[in-house]
């Protein structure tokens, strides 16, 4: 499944959700997207943007956040592009840069950015200074 993340009605990036690894969450996306939320920056968690969705889903493809970053650095040279869902707070999280959280916090590692990495990085840096812009998540056509 592919999703489009837009900020202030401008498409920023395309995300692949690994349906084989997170089937229950993928089904929730099918039922509830498109959704609009308020964009935030994970200032204490590295180069991360996130937003809350009205989706309740169990842990799937469970990782510790520190291991998501380590795995992506080993495979791609950077944690940028990792997409996760933090179930307890219903937060959709996207890493846009090289600084990833080293916390041993459980998270569902659900996919990755497949297009628009540069646009995402710009949006992430802008969000550091300008939080609460409208963000939309929808299924790609």
Image (spheres, rainbow, N blue to C red):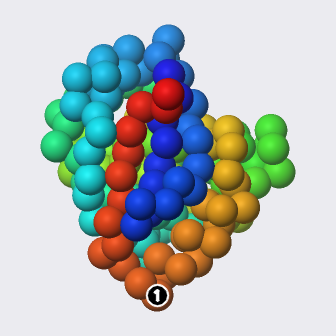
Confirm whether residue 9 shows in the render: yes
Judged from the image, the secondary structure of the residue bearing numbered disc 1 is helix
Rate crowding at label 1 as few (under 14), some (14 to 19) or many (20 or more) other CA atoms within 10 Å.
few
Residue furthest to the bottom in view is: 129
User: In percent of the image, x 47 and y 76: which residue is there?
Assistant: 127
Q: Position of residue 43 (x, y in %)?
A: 45, 77
Callout count? 1
The x and y percentages for residue 11 are 53, 54
Residue at x 26%, y 53% (from the top left corner) = 36
> Relative to the observer, which residue lies in front, 34 or 21?
34
Give the residue pinned by disc 1: 129
Whether residue 101 appears in this view of the structure is no
Q: Is residue 1 above or below residue 56?
A: above
Which is more toward the observer, 134 or 86?
A: 134
Residue 140 drawn at (x, y percent): 49, 32
Please, is residue 121 above or below residue 32 in the view?
below
Q: Is residue 69 left or right of residue 140?
A: right
Q: Is residue 54 above or below residue 58?
A: below
Residue in view at x 57 percent, y 31 percent: 16
The percent position of residue 136, horizontal first and vertical second, equals 36, 52
Q: Residue at x 58, y 77 (%)?
A: 125
């Amino acid at each position: 499944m592919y999703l489009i993340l837009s900020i202030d009605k401008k498409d920023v990036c395309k995300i692949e959700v690994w349906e084989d690894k997170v089937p229950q969450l993928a089904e929730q996306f099918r039922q509830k997207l498109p959704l609009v939320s308020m964009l935030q920056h994970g200032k204490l968690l590295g180069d991360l943007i996130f937003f809350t969705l009205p989706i309740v889903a169990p842990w799937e493809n469970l990782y510790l956040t520190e291991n998501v970053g380590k795995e992506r650095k080993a495979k791609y040279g950077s944690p940028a592009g990792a997409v996760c869902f933090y179930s307890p707070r219903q937060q959709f999280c996207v890493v846009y840069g090289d600084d990833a959280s080293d916390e041993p916090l459980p998270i569902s590692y659900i996919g990755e950015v497949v297009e628009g990495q540069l646009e995402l990085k710009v949006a992430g840096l802008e969000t550091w200074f300008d939080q609460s812009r409208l963000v939309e998540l929808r299924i790609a056509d």
